[in-house]
Image: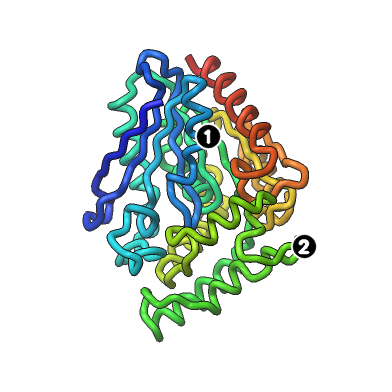
Amino acid sequence: MVKTETVFKSSDKAHMLMVTVWAPDNKQDIKAVVQIAHGMKEYMERYSEFAQYLTDNGIAVVGNDHLGHGRSTENKTELGFFSSGDSSDILVKDMYRLTKRINKAFPGVPKFLIGHSMGSFLTRRYLTIYGNELDGVIIMGTGSQSQLTLKAGLGIIKLLSFIYGDKHRSNFVNKIVFGGYNKKISEKDTGNWLTKDQSVVDTYNGDPYCNFVFTLNGFKWLFENMEYVQKPDNYMKTPKDIPMLIISGKDDPVGNYGKGVKKVYDIYKKCGVHDVSMKLYENDRHELINETDKEVVYADILDWIVKNKESRL
């Protein structure tokens, strides 16, 4: 495997984004390329083991650290702050900028997008605008929230931003968003809702690129993207012929323990997406690729990519 790093300018025209590329040793062996949109309060380096597995099987992996995340920040004060202004679609525009770079670097190779958690909501928004650029999409660790809940949350965030500024880190909002995620599991440490693998939880909790509180700006952009993808008209903008796999842990609170995931699946089916499938992993939590049965998840993802790569050629 060859690992390289580069940067490109964000759509906000103010920040440089860190990009990590994992590729098979021989470029001629590349069968497909997977672009990853990572989740909230993490960064691409956390996907290195998963990327190693895919590259061992002839699939290149590319992903950028989103604005306000990982090494796309210059210092800790930027963590959890996306950018000034009200354009929450910048994150999706950045993903598309990376897609265009991937197309140039790997011409003629099938392209797939995997979005996890926050990245799943960004991916669902991406599909409504740039979906025809892809040969398939995997939506991982997603959920379905009511418009009323999201509007109420945005109202609180905007009020607090008016009072304290959009760079303020609100423990109150953080508790509203994450406070109930550990309620159905025996372990109560921060991060246990992510996976049953305690070593992953400990590493996450000790990583300064993961263990921080979002700014109000960060929560606002997150909620705005979630609100966007929940609107029926925007669901309808998804290409009907794109192969789609929706996967989640059955014990994932983000997906309301499978109920929210099933709702997303049902809506895509109702909207006419022809080739959409769903799998819920029994006893697994939020981060499927970091779970105790991750080898099963890895293999399922690889099998799906290989099947759809061949069907799109």
CA distance separating discs 2 and 1: 34 Å
**Please, what secondary structure does the residue beneath circle 1 have?**
strand
- Residue type highlighted by circle 2: Ser
Numbered badge on residue 186:
2
Residue at 51% across / 37% down in the picture?
49
**Please, what secondary structure does the residue beneath circle 2 have?**
loop
Residue at 41% across / 25% down in the picture?
1
Provide residue 223's location: percent of width, then percent of height: 50, 63
Residue sitting at the far bottom: 163
Q: Is residue 171 or residue 230 the one in the foreground?
A: 171
List the residue tagged with mark 1: 137
Q: Residues within 10 Å of mark 1 (few under 14, many from 20)?
A: many
Residue at 37% across / 75% down in the picture?
166
Q: Is residue 34 above or below residue 303?
A: below
Q: Is residue 276 left or right of residue 103?
A: right
Q: Is residue 291 left or right of residue 38?
A: right
Residue at 59% across / 19% down in the picture?
307
Q: Is residue 199 left or right of residue 218?
A: right
Q: Residues within 10 Å of mark 2 (few under 14, many from 20)?
A: few
Q: Is residue 19 or residue 280 the one in the foreground?
A: 19
Q: Are marks 2 and 1 in contact (CB under 8 Å)?
A: no
- Residue type highlighted by circle 1: Val
Q: According to the image, what is the colour scheme of the structure? A: rainbow
